[in-house]
Image (cartoon, rainbow, N blue to C red):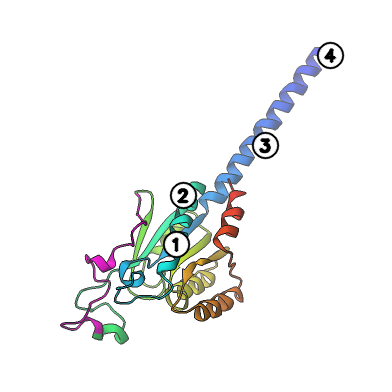
Amino acid sequence: MKQDQSTALVLQNNMKNENQIGQNDFGSSLIRNHTALLVIDMQNDFVLEDGSLRVDGGLAIVPNVIKAVEVARQRGFLVVWVVREHDPMGRDVELFRRHLYADGKPKPISKGTKGAELVNGLVIKEEDYKVVKTRFSAFFATNLHSVLQGAGIDSLVVAGVQTPNCVRQTVFDAVELDYKSVTVIVDATAAATPDVHAANVYDMKNIGVVAPTLKEWCETTLSMV
């Protein structure tokens, strides 16, 4: 009788341990697989010193964006590359920018040009996803929301340029679309000036967006593994 009781106790403990392991694995996987990193407009024309639409703070954040992508992949997050690729004649560009596509003008971020390529150090991998947009928000007239929903994504992390335009518009749309968590990495995003950047981060924090430094974000996501 004692042996039967001991055997039953061992089986119960084994089942309990197996359930805990399964729950922990599932929970960890659930968190990882529900988060996506959106890397916005880290293209030569926006970032390099001679870029035709250069954002002054863009070049300085390249190392941090590279690190954010590396960490996201380590954590199992989906990496989404959000880029602009315009018609060389400017037919899909905002009205206020169409003069830049006239004859003899720079025709920034035109599809297939060097200016539309990602800056050195940022590479799209097979498991990543690429979204091409023609307006500020990554969600406007794209399939991004559908893709994220299909992948079970409910939490977004944002890096890239520039804070008052494409970053801000994407973040506000994400909040409006009821993503559970929206994070902007403050030192992996940039604007023309630090003051413009800070003002827009302040606005985004006021609508519930989390704004950690890269170091803080890396430490937070470590607990998800």
In reply to whether residue 107 is colored magenta, the answer given is yes
Q: In this picture, is 63 found above or below 97?
A: above
Q: Are marks 1 and 2 in contact (CB under 8 Å)?
A: no
If you read the primary sequence from the N terminus, does the residue marked by circle 3 or circle 4 appear first? 4
Mark 3 or 1: the one toward you: 1
Question: How much space separates mark 3 and mark 4, taking CA atoms?
Answer: 27 Å
The three-letter amino acid code for the residue at tag 3 is: Gln
Residue 58, quarter of picture: bottom left
Q: Is residue 104 left or right of residue 217?
A: left
Q: Residues within 10 Å of mark 1 (few under 14, many from 20)?
A: many
Which quadrant is the N terminus positioned in? top right
Residue bounds of the magenta highlight: 100-125
Residue 56, quarter of picture: bottom left
Q: Which residue is mark 3?
A: 20
Q: Which mark is residue 73?
A: 2
Which quadrant is the C terminus positioned in? top right
The three-letter amino acid code for the residue at tag 4 is: Lys
Q: Secondary structure at mark 1?
A: strand
Question: How much space separates mark 2 and mark 3, taking CA atoms?
Answer: 26 Å
Q: Which residue is mark 4?
A: 2
Q: Nearer the viewer, residue 52 or 175?
A: 52
If you read the primary sequence from the N terminus, does the residue marked by circle 3 or circle 1 appear first? 3
Q: Secondary structure at mark 3?
A: helix
The dominant secondary structure in magenta is: loop
Q: Position of residue 100 (x, y in %)?
A: 25, 83
In reply to whether residue 168 is colored magenta, the answer given is no
